[in-house]
Image: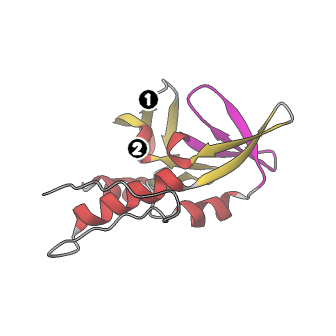
Amino acid sequence: MKVSIEEISKEKEEEILIRCHEVDDEIYEIVNKLETENLILIGYHNDIINRIKLSDIYYFEAVDGKVFMYSKDNVFEIKQKLYELEELCKERNCFRASKSTILNIAKISVINPSISGRFESLLDNGERVVVSRQYVPVLKNMLGL
């Protein structure tokens, strides 16, 4: 595969063009990666508004009617509901891992089968997140198992 980069003037809009013989899983994966990098979410931490890339988020969790997003070192409150985030992040390396959690599959280091058909995932930042048994097939499908 040939990769070309062309510098343009500031007046022109940046664009990425993919020329391919066939749109296959690899092309979809590349496009997915590019779109994930560009999605920005607004999080609140200590009364400060933060702009965070979806690619920097490890997981989202709903607790006591509030939704939080977890990055490598910080926790941010987010105004969207979990179902809204699920729709927004669909096909962007994120999936529903439990009733209260959406997990970024790109941040998983290790996956271990656990009791009662659940999986336990170890994330790059050392945190452990449980994947409920009803969502295990979704994870397996995303991993190609």
Q: Left or right: where does residue 53 sit relative to residue 106?
A: right
What scheme was used to colour the molecule?
A: secondary structure
**The residue under label 2 is which amino acid type?**
Ala
Q: Where is residue 64 shown, x and y percent of the image?
A: 81, 45
Q: Is residue 143 above or below residue 72?
A: below
**The residue under label 1 is which amino acid type?**
Asp
Q: Left or right: where does residue 30 sit relative to residue 40?
A: left
Extreme-right residue of the structure: 47
Q: Where is residue 117 shown, x and y percent of the image?
A: 40, 47
Residue holding disc 2: 106
Residue 43 appears in the picture as rendered = yes
**Residue 124 tag number:** 1
Instruction: Identify the residue at horizontal 81%, vertical 50% (top origin).
Output: 65
Of the 4 image quadrants, the one containing the N terminus is bottom left
Q: Where is residue 56 shown, x and y percent of the image?
A: 53, 40
- Which numbered disc flags the more N-terminal residue, 1 or 2? 2
**Foreground residue, 77 or 130?**
77
Instruction: Identify the residue at horizontal 61%, vertical 52% (top origin).
Output: 40
User: Magenta part of the protein: which range?
Assistant: 57-79
The answer to if 91 sits in the magenta stretch is no
**Foreground residue, 30 or 121?**
30
Q: Left or right: where does residue 56 sit relative to residue 22?
A: right
Instruction: Identify the residue at horizontal 43%, vertical 38% (top origin).
Output: 107
Instruction: Identify the residue at horizontal 23%, vertical 61% (top origin).
Output: 26
